[in-house]
Image (cartoon, rainbow, N blue to C red):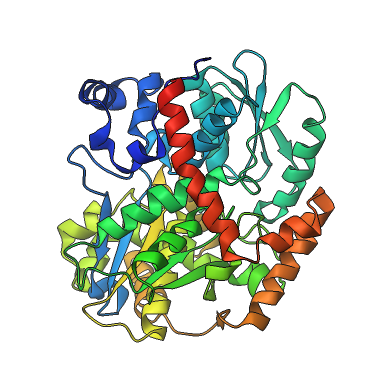
């Protein structure tokens, strides 16, 4: 039996304590000292050295709601965001299926940045050449990282919302049989990874908080991988509401809107192929500049937050933990807590995909656009953006007719890429998603046997 590059199973990423002790220890050893040591593949997990999910719980002095807003932290993953997980899952499944061979194939990573960073990173660890295809207007920090990991960049014109151009470009490059795409918007390892690893980590994260259940999960879809965690959350807590967030300026799912916006990584002007529409209960819209300003408040305003009653030490510890989309997810979580009238016992879980390290240039741009960002401005922003979050712009997608709108959007987006109506119709049934999820066990078996 041929060998595949050495890496963890889905189960081991959820339960790193089950990784053979010597490997886990060595992996933790290289985490801080040698980013490019392949053993770092075993650090792809939401958990810290003690096996605890990395998270923060935001207090009502910031959020204005009694409900517990629990934020899982993606920044501590190797390469700086959880997107490395889906990138690894897609690559390892391709290796197992025999579709991706080391030394023979070049990996294509269509992305708005973080998935591309993840692809460049795991390709460096697993010995593949990589080309990252992304819009040419993302934050500078993203391109720097991709180049640092040795991948090539193939830039398409436009902004975040023009990610469809990256898909078209990937389609072109794919015609060369040497190139193999890790198509995050289309391939189900992304769904499997988030449902198995993120979903179950979210369920563990709320143990001992409030009533220990999840009342609501919010996630702004880019590829709609992260929101797959909601499928697992709903299994454990059937009352949980799963909420997709979109930029107000680009509300494709809610209203068919297709405008430009400032929240990198989300709002890609489509319903992605791997989005399980059946389990999305609501779509809520968040203003893009609220997210950028909110990030500035968290990053530079601990003393302002302390005036509002947040312990200074706690507010200082939040610095560097969030990016713009993380603030979007938090604002969506607060919005839904108000809308669902949640109280002290209730938990809303959300995700900070990455940390501040890739956004200094975005904050630099905000500072150029605003007349001032002194403390009195941050004080006003903290109140207006976090504490006065309202329940406007929430769309209920629980009925069959409203889901039909999303199914139609998906057809519009994916029939042109050669997917059949029959395949897309299959996704209207819950069994499609259950069968795809069940394949986690099959891949885990094969990873163990072949590594
Ligand atoms: C910063 C950021 N936030 C959110 C997302 C959306 O996550 P997902 O693609 O899992 O929907 C991405 C995806 O690349 C991202 O880079």
Q: Is residue 349 left or right of residue 432?
A: left
Residue 192 drawn above or below residue 244: above
Residue 255 at least partly seen: no
Q: Position of residue 277 (x, y in %)?
A: 60, 67
Residue 115 at least partly seen: yes
Residue at point 48%, 54% (across, down): 226
Question: Could you say which quadrant of the image residue 130 lies in?
Answer: top right
Q: Position of residue 243 (x, y in %)?
A: 49, 71
Residue 392 drawn above or below residue 84: below
Q: Position of residue 209 (x, y in %)?
A: 19, 67
Nearer to the camera, 326 or 98: 98
Question: Could you say which quadrant of the image residue 85 lies in?
Answer: top left
Residue 14 drawn above or below residue 223: above
Nearer to the camera, 440 or 30: 440
Residue at point 43%, 44% (across, down): 82
Nearer to the camera, 158 or 410: 410
Q: Position of residue 306 (x, y in %)?
A: 20, 67
Which quadrant is home to the C terminus?
top left
Q: Is residue 407 left or right of residue 239?
A: right
Q: Is residue 26 left or right of residue 191?
A: left
Number of marks in the rendered image: 0
Nearer to the camera, 5 or 43: 5
């Amino acid at each position: 039996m041929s060998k595949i590059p050495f890496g963890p199973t889905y189960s081991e990423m959820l339960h790193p304590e089950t990784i053979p002790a010597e490997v886990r220890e060595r992996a933790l050893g290289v985490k801080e000292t040698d980013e490019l040591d392949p053993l770092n593949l075993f650090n792809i997990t939401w958990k810290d050295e003690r096996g605890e999910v990395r998270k923060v719980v935001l207090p009502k002095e910031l959020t204005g709601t009694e409900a517990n807003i629990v934020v899982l932290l993606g920044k501590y993953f190797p390469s700086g965001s959880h997107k490395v997980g889906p990138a690894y899952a897609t690559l390892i499944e391709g290796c197992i299926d025999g579709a991706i061979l080391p030394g023979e194939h070049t990996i294509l990573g269509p992305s708005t940045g973080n998935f591309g960073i993840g692809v460049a990173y795991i390709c460096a660890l697993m010995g593949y050449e990589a080309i990252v295809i992304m819009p040419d207007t993302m934050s500078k920090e993203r391109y720097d990282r991709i180049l640092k990991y040795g991948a090539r960049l193939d830039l398409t014109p436009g902004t975040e919302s023009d990610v469809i151009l990256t898909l078209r470009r990937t389609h072109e490059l794919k015609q060369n049989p040497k190139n193999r795409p890790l198509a995050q918007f289309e391939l189900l390892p992304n769904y499997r990874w988030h449902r198995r690893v993120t979903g179950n980590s979210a369920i563990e994260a709320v143990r001992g908080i409030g009533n220990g259940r999840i009342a609501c999960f919010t996630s702004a879809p880019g590829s709609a991988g992260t929101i797959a965690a909601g499928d697992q959350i709903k299994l454990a807590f059937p009352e949980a509401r799963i909420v997709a967030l979109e930029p107000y300026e680009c509300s494709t799912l809610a209203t068919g809107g297709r405008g430009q916006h400032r929240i990198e990584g989300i709002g890609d002007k489509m319903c992605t192929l791997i989005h399980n529409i059946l389990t999305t209960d609501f779509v809520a819209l968040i203003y893009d500049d609220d997210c950028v300003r909110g990030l500035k408040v968290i990053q530079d305003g601990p003393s302002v937050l302390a005036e509002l009653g947040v312990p200074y030490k706690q507010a200082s510890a939040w610095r560097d933990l969030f990016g713009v989309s993380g603030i979007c997810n938090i604002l969506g979580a607060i919005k839904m807590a108000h809308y669902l009238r949640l109280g002290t016992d209730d938990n809303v879980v959300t995700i900070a995909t990455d940390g501040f390290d890739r956004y200094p240039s975005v904050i630099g741009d905000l500072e150029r656009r605003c007349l001032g960002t002194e403390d009195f401005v941050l004080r006003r922003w903290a109140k207006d953006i976090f504490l006065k979050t309202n329940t406007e712009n929430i769309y209920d997608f629980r009925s069959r007719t409203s889901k039909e709108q999303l199914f139609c959007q998906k057809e519009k987006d994916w029939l042109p890429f050669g997917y059949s109506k029959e395949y897309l119709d299959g996704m209207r049934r819950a069994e499609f998603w259950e069968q795809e999820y069940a394949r986690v066990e099959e891949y885990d078996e094969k990873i163990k046997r072949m590594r």
